[in-house]
Image (cartoon, rainbow, N blue to C red):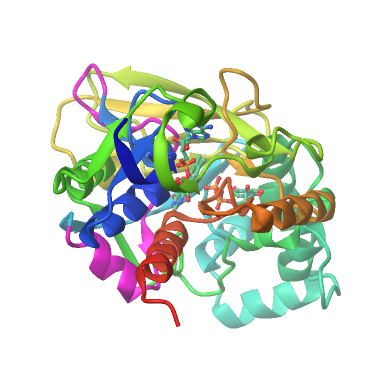
Amino acid sequence: MKHYDYLITGAGISGLVAAERLAKEGLSSLVIDKRDHIGGNCYDEYDEHGVLIHRYGPHYFRTQSKEVVDYLSQFTEWIPAHYRVLSHIQGTYYQFPINLTTFEQIMGRSSSEAEMEATLKEWRHDYPNPSNSEEAVLAQVGEKLYRMFYEGYTTKQWKCSPKELDPSVCQRIPIRTNRDDRYLTEEFQMMPKQGYTAMFQKMIGSSPLIEIQLQTSLEEIRAHTSFGSLIYTGPIDRYFNDCLGKLPYRSLRFEHEHYPHCDYYQETVQVNYPNEEKYTRIVETKHITQQQIKGTTITKEYPQDIDSSHPPYYPIPNPESKALYQQYAQLAKQESQVYFIGRLAKYRYYNMDQVVAMALQLVSKLTSPGP
Ligand code: FAD
Ligand code: UDP
């Protein structure tokens, strides 16, 4: 039987980075995934009309980490990205995140940073240490803007009140009193020039020490595979057969629609629909891939419970789930030669750059000479 230094469960970005780094150190891995493609949730593909789409929702690369950029730049060139989002409320497209232009749209006249700051000061609720997402937004912008932009979207997305979610969920969205309308604040905001999947192919294609086996689960092959250590990037509760209970996750359903006769369907890459519609957002990736092609494809995103055809995408951060995760993390510590990384195994709402950094750190620890 062939022996691998590592069995890596999950061919998402964290598993692939780990495999690439291990190979650089002369160590072999077998990377497996239940899905029929590499890339995990970052996977992008050309649809049947030739449009490059993100199968699992929009993936906007951004980071503050030079180390992550330098690392990924070995496998891709970058194109500048303009992640701009509108929020559609009762027929009006508001700039989002909330900024001075949004404020002017709401007031129906021109305004200034000073006026917006003074008004928000009046509108804000006094929560010096918000304990949930509702308090976090009320403390930033007050009730009117909370109800317009956040309450409906968050309830739809997470199937619970913002009161039941960690403040960090809604705090992901910046609030600005200037005219900066970028969705994200990180310094480096770029997209891989040929897409994520192309970047991953380059990452793993370079080494004979990396083998990929798709449509394969850990449960199926663990007992019949010879390996030294395991790197696991799937849901941590599943690894332990849910022995302490199931952790809550949210899933999504994606509906892709193609429009052959228009260059663009909407003005920006993303339009949010916080209120009436069943979907939360419509994404048109062509705006950020900058693909030159006739026709366009959009993706409507419907929040959804997890089930056999809707895998876990988001850990649901609240005090109970965090406490349960901590118990699983204790079990994880007791596993010998098993390393847990990535969004699902760490049960944290991590972005791509954060899991890349985590994989780099793990391999550096595993391959550095001991004391
Ligand atoms: P995953 O991509 O989830 O990969 C894990 C893989 O493990 C999966 O492919 C799964 O099939 C496989 N697996 C699990 N269990 C098993 C098993 N038992 N056997 C075999 N295989 C198994 N991040 C950003 O930086 N910017 C964004 O704009 C952004 N947008 C997002 C939008 C959406 C809708 C979602 C869901 C996430 C978004 N993210 C974004 C986060 C990003 O997707 C994650 O940070 C990243 O994909 C995590 O990578 P991972 O390798 O940890 O996990
Ligand atoms: N959110 C909201 N209204 C919006 C956009 C986001 O209330 O128009 C909240 C919602 O709870 C969401 C969170 O902010 O889950 C984080 O938004 P982000 O766009 O970062 O979500 P992701 O891309 O991770 O799904």
> In the rendered view, would you say 222 is above or below 288?
above
- Can residue 285 be seen here? The reply is yes
Residue range of the region highlighted in magenta in the rendering: 47-74
Task: Give residue 174's quadrant in the image.
Answer: bottom right
Instruction: Determine if the magenta segment contains residue 229.
Output: no
What residue appears at the point 19 percent right and 58 percent down from the top-left corner?
78
Quarter of the image where the N terminus is located: top left
- x%, y% of residue 356? 39, 59
Can you see residue 340? no
| For residue 324, side relative to residue 24 (left or right) | right
> Depth check: 17 or 168 in front?
17
Image point 24% across, 62% down: which residue? 25
Q: What residue appears at the point 79 percent right and 71 percent down from the top-left corner?
A: 124
Q: Which is nearer the eye, 132 or 249?
A: 249
Residue 339 image point, x, y percent? 52, 54
Q: Position of residue 47 (x, y in %)?
A: 26, 22
Image side of residue 198 versus residue 311, left or right: left
In the picture, measured across the screen, residue 366 lies left or right of residue 278, that is left
Residue 199: percent from left, percent from top: 22, 47
- From the image, which quarter does the C terminus lie in? bottom left
- The quadrant in which residue 3 appears is top left
Q: Is residue 66 magenta?
A: yes
Which residue is at the far front? 1
Q: How many marks?
A: 0
Residue at 57%, 24% (x, y): give it.
310
Q: Nearer the viewer, residue 318 or 328?
A: 328
